[in-house]
Image: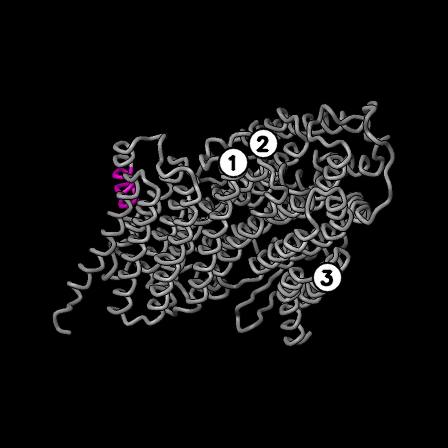
Amino acid sequence: MTWLTPHIGTQLVDFGSAMLLLTCFAIVAQRRLSACVDLFALQSLFLAMTAALVAFLTGTRHIYIAAALTVVVKVIVIPRVLKGVIERLNVTRELVMKVNVPASLLICGALVMIAFFITQPIIPFGHLLTRDSLAIALAIVLIGFFTMISRQKAVTQLIAFLVMENGLFLGATAATYGMPLIVELGVFFDVLVAALIAGIYTNRLQDAFDSVDTTHLSELKE
Amino acid sequence: MTGQTVTIAVGLLLLAPLVAGWLSLFIKGSRWLHVTNLISIGTLVGAEAIIARAVFAQGSVTAFGEIVYIDALSSIILFIIGTVGLACSLYMRSYMDEQVARGVIAPKRLNLFFFLFHMFLLAMVLATVANSLGVQWVAIEATTLATTFLIAFWRRRESLEAGWKYLILCSVGISLALFGVVLMYYSSLRVLGDVSSALNITQLQQVAAQLDPHILKLAFVFLFVGYGTKVGLVPMHSWLPDAYTEAPAPVAAMLAGVLETVAVYAILRCRGIADQALSPDFTGGLLALFGLISFALASFFILLQHNYKRLFAYSSIEHMGLAMVGFGVGGTIGNFGGLFHLVNHAFAKSLAFFAAGNIHRRFKTVEIDQVRGLTTVLPWSALALLISGLALAALPPFALFTSEMQIVTALGSSGLPREWTQPGTKFPVVMLLLCSVVAFAGFLYRITTMVWGTAPKDVVQGERWSVGHIPIILLGAVLVGFCLALPVSLRQFFEMASTLLVSR
């Protein structure tokens, strides 16, 4: 393909990473739990596409496997499990937030800047193709971290954790063209099991506390 | 010792918990579950002994085409996993059976318990012997997943809360560590260029000096924060007291004695690589600073506790902080002290949790105020509590006092690593000593009020002999034995490991 010059390739990868970041902001702004799950699935799809693109442009075969696994695990299986969990719950929306949506978005904007600032000294060492994705990956990790702290529903916290994981995967693809295959498989396994366990937990919390609001989890104190 | 023997031993090390875990799901009857468990742990300990001998002769061994790498440091961690695991297995025989007999758990759930227990063991063994930092990360995350249901095993509201907190905090922490692993890989790929083995410790050690310091600095900070959450360093410690209180006693003993040690090991491994490219003061400073903060804060929290399991939890944070100070200050004495402290703490803390489990079953409360007169109610457990309490308070001649003094000496003679403080500041040593006095007083005061006094009338008196007393007596004997002498072979092992840790 003659039109696919390295320059255009870089642009495409950057575009994919930017879409991931965009869906991150959408998740932060979204109060409805099921919409959050959909957005997470969309983000994972973007992630798989970006990874496949990197695999195609660099000819690194094993990233294809990781991309395929992303589609299976994060676009199909985990969202389905989460949807099942939400259906059982008596809440569909995140009602009370510690930080409201506009303020959250502003903080996330600041986090993106911090991510670029932190990674600035090490970005020039990277591959030309995926240079800027590392900063975006760190930004996604930080936003996931922040969402985890600021939200109260167990499901949202779980989604935030998965968003962090997406950011990490983008980072691994961007910085190093993927980790060794055995490590990547292990990571996928861990994420899948973590999501399943958290799903079971949410059900048990619902049964025991009649709510998945983690503010009720305050019986253990000093 | 041929390479083949070592390969078989390593294979057994990993296969024993895996096979026993899956078998546990299908075995009927608690007796056979315990037998399987003991066989598996026995195999584990035997394999460790073979590996330790090989390591002693050769310095380090690799197996399965460099997937497994074991040196003196990992042998010591394996030794802790094996011995504490064995003690827990014996203790579980009486502890878990009584819970089933009292109807706290259905007999069927015992299968799940043993399955998770073995997966927990397997993950810890894998994290210790893995050559690749990536595989090590996967294994440490797997320990979180295996233990979260063990912590919430009673399924009460409080235990669910503790389990959820543990799962979320540790998973997030560990995710940050994964970013550190990615960065480590990023830096090593530029030097090694080989995709499959660029995360292997054996490869990284050879080229560590050429790695880029900027990337490594960032990588180490992420790794330290991530694994530090698992160790329970302040301010990432908030899951720890809840988890230890709610977990069944043998699980709490494993968490406190072994899991923390494995997390410390992961930090030390990464540090060994980072130190060769960075100035050791950077990593050492980070370790010592967080260790000091954890130690100081935990020693004051010990004063506030009115729940004995939380008391032990904060004492864990305190001791891990102290060991971190030892590793951070470094040098031969600091590293030796830190390692020795880890081992002593593992024994003393598991003994403490065994005693706590017995007390909890008899008094049905975790409040210190309601437990009185242990000497008449549970004489053996009282003795165990007293021995572990004195050891954990670091009273001489217990070995924890020796290791604590080594760490204090190291800190006093070389001070905190230079990057963070003025050279020659005596403030850290003074603070460390003051806080240790506070912790000592607070801890002993709480323990002694429980041991002496007159027992409440409604509590049954007298202690019947059970299998669960074997590990209590053995651990107590080891703790007292370490007062008198450290076996020569064990000391040589510690010396080997601490020379590995001394950076340049």
* Residue that mark 3 sits on: B36
What's the distance in space between the residues labelled 1 and 2, CA to CA?
8 Å
Q: Along the horizontal axis of the image, is A191 left or right of B9?
A: left
Residue at image coords 60%, 38%: B156
Q: Regarding mark 3 in the picture, which secondary structure is present there?
A: helix
Q: In which quarter of the image is the N terminus of chain A?
A: bottom left
Same chain for mark 1 and mark 2? The answer is: yes
Q: Magenta residues, as a range? A: A108-118
Q: Regarding mark 1 in the picture, which secondary structure is present there?
A: loop
Q: Going from the N terminus, do you reach mark 3 or mark 2 first? A: 3
Vertically, is B492 above or below A55?
above
What's the distance in space between the residues labelled 1 and 3, CA to CA?
38 Å
Chain name for mark 1: B
Q: Are marks 1 and 2 in contact (CB under 8 Å)?
A: yes
Q: Going from the N terminus, do you reach mark 1 or mark 2 first? A: 1
- List x then y, in percent, for residue B317: 59, 37
* Residue that mark 2 sits on: B298
* Residue that mark 1 sits on: B234
Chain name for mark 3: B
Q: Along the horizontal axis of the image, is B396 left or right of B112?
A: right
Q: Is residue B123 visible?
A: yes
Residue B280 is inside the magenta segment: no
Q: How many labels does the image show?
A: 3
Q: Going from the N terminus, do you reach mark 1 or mark 3 first? A: 3
Q: Between A62 and B276, which is closer to the camera in this rendering?
A: A62
Residue at image coords 62%, 24%: B304
Q: What residue type is labelled 2?
A: Ala
- List x then y, in percent, for residue B52: 68, 63
- List x then y, in percent, for residue A44: 32, 55
- List x then y, in percent, for residue B86: 73, 54
